[in-house]
Amino acid sequence: MTDRISLRQLDYFVIAAETGTMTEAAQRLFVSQSAVSLGIAELERQLRVQLLFRAKGRGLTLTQAGRRLLPEARALLARTEELQAGMRDLGQSPAGRLTVGCFSTLAPFLLPPLLEEFQAAFPEVVVDFVEGSLVELQRLLLEGRCELALLYGVDLEPTIHQELLYLTRPHVLLPSGHRLADAETVRLADLADHEMIVLDVPPSLRYFTEVLAGAGVTPTVRHRTENFETVRSLVARGFGYSLLIQHPSVDVSYEGRRLEVRRISDEVVPLPVVLARPVGAEPTRRAAAFAAFCHAAVPRIADP
């Protein structure tokens, strides 16, 4: 009968892959370095593949087999943790640690109220979060570093499953006193003669460019920035207009300068905000609870 691999071996492998050295893995696991090394070697023997390259002075590097095993090992360990918590708390609420990803410009608007409300409803679940770009968060999902992610539902890999939370539309941001701010709405064609401040974070740039192109406008870009508040500060200083999705409750920049927010009068394709997870990944009980909570709470939080 073939020897079965153990959860301890998988744990040693995952921590070693994350830390990059046997020494740091042993310190995190509170075991000896030889125990980690022997455990991983035995795992490789049982699987009949090499999982880690060991280079003196350069640490550990995942092999192709190791890269394939890593997300599956993380998922299995997460399911085991939930099983233990579920058996301890049989008949009670979901428990354990849940890591959630969130797109960087969505995070300040959605995460604080969502985490506060979810914590009150499910006090036994400890929620951690990571912010990042569309590419980064998809990678973290597929590597098993986070179970769910709040993203814009465009340019997602086919390996990512998405559930619509709500649809959002852009608005025009103008400096105080701008002549286009006299009306309650702005025609996109009227922006053609004005310089633009661009939030240069995918998928924002492509989406805003396509929105303007639909009205026959090719934007004249004055400045690009990856920072949401830098966009608002530059617009407040009169360097140009911008298109943004998120709308803070206070229409002033960090410097306290007034900003004018106007709706777009044109028909604009909305941008979906979705809850994402890897295709085929069975959600843990805590992840399923968080997903259900998001469907109920996020639309209200985003549009109070």
Image (cartoon, rainbow, N blue to C red):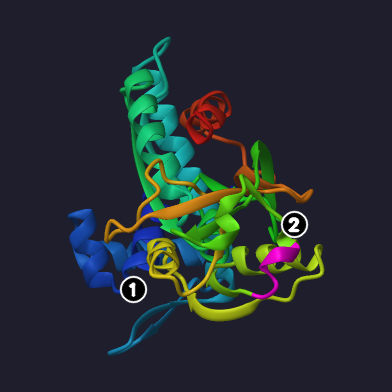
301 or 47: nearer the viewer = 301
- Magenta span contains residue 192: yes
Amino acid type, label 2? Pro
* Secondary structure type for disc 1: loop
Query: Residue 228 in the image: x percent, y percent?
Result: 43, 62
Any part of residue 3 in sight: no
**Residue that carries the numbered disc 2 in the rendered image:** 158
**Residue that carries the numbered disc 1 in the rendered image:** 20
Q: CA distance from mark 1 to mark 2?
A: 30 Å
In magenta, the rendered stretch is 189-193
Amino acid type, label 1? Gly
22 or 231: nearer the viewer = 231
Q: Residue visible at 53% across and 56% down? A: 71
Query: Residue 160 in the image: x percent, y percent?
Result: 67, 52
> How many discs appear?
2
Q: Residue visible at 43% across and 9% down? A: 91
Please identify the quarter of the rendering in which residue 127 is found.
top left
274 is higher (above) or lower (below) than 20: above
54 or 259: nearer the viewer = 259
* Secondary structure type for disc 2: loop
Q: Earlier in the sequence, mark 1 or mark 2?
A: 1
